[in-house]
């Protein structure tokens, strides 16, 4: 998907203990992937371009993580599949790694989507991202905000009451607890 859109880089999934890549599938066919990068002594990928902003969060005691390499098959138009993938990613970040703040680098044409659908806020100005040879904004959302939206809206997709975000398509808080418990048991 990244090469098809003209982004530079290898776009392969590396074996890195600080990253987990999740895949969504439908009837055995992979329809989407996304990677969660957990902060470590090596930092996160976004540090290459936006370390000045991310360091401000670390200095306040934040445990940061980042979302990278989101790709969905173009024929898939399922908010539920996308929301489920994001929700499991947030569960990993929150429950397994105690992350407090989530970052994502996005192309300008995708910025509004993440802001409207997941509550991300823009941090700083547009910069050039050499990993993909494209412009990027750094977006941020606190895990507290994500958790609050899940508590209020998770599992309500049948009755979203005019809500336009992805959060109604997330799992219900009860389902989230079950998923988190199972993931914590397997480590």
Image: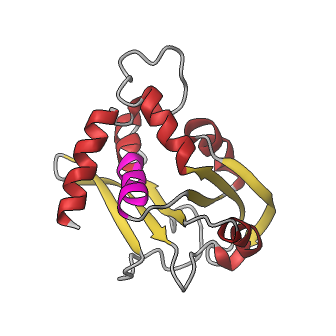
Relative height, residue 140 to residue 164 (above, below): below
Residue at x-position 69% and y-position 68%: 54
Q: Which residues are magenta?
A: 86-96
In the displayed structure, does residue 71 sit left or right of residue 145? left
Answer with the quarter of the image where residue 139 lies: bottom right
Give coordinates of residue 21: x percent, y percent.
36, 66
Question: Please, what is the dominant secondary structure of the magenta stretch?
Answer: helix
The answer to whether any part of residue 146 appears in the image is: yes
Residue furthest to the front: 61
* For residue 20, above or below residue 81: below
Magenta stretch contains residue 153? no
Can residue 73 be seen here? The reply is no
Residue 152 % position (x, y)? 46, 27
Report the residue at 35% width, 51% height from top. 88
Q: Which of the colour schemes (rainbow, by chain, secondary structure, one colour) is used?
A: secondary structure
Question: Is residue 92 within the magenta segment?
Answer: yes
Q: Nearer the viewer, residue 1 or 126?
A: 126
Instruction: Please give the name of the residue rendered at 37% of the width and 56% of the height, measured from the top-left corner.
Output: 95
């Amino acid at each position: 998907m990244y090469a098809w859109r003209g982004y530079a880089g290898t776009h392969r999934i590396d074996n890195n203990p600080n990253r987990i890549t999740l895949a969504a599938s439908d009837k055995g066919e992979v329809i989407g992937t996304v990677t969660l990068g957990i902060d470590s002594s090596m930092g996160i990928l976004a540090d290459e371009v936006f370390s000045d902003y991310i360091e401000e969060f670390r200095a306040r005691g934040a445990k940061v993580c980042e979302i990278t390499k989101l790709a969905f098959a173009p024929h898939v138009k399922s908010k539920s599949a996308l929301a489920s993938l994001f929700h499991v990613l947030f569960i990993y970040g929150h429950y397994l790694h105690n992350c407090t703040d989530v970052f994502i680098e996005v192309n300008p044409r995708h910025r509004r989507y993440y802001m409207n659908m997941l509550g991300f806020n823009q941090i700083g100005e547009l910069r050039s991202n050499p990993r993909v040879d494209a412009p990027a904004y750094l977006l941020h959302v606190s895990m507290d905000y994500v958790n609050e939206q899940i508590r209020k809206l998770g599992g309500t997709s049948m009755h979203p009451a005019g809500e336009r975000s992805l959060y109604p398509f997330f799992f219900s808080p009860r389902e989230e607890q079950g998923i988190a418990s199972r993931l914590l048991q397997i480590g």
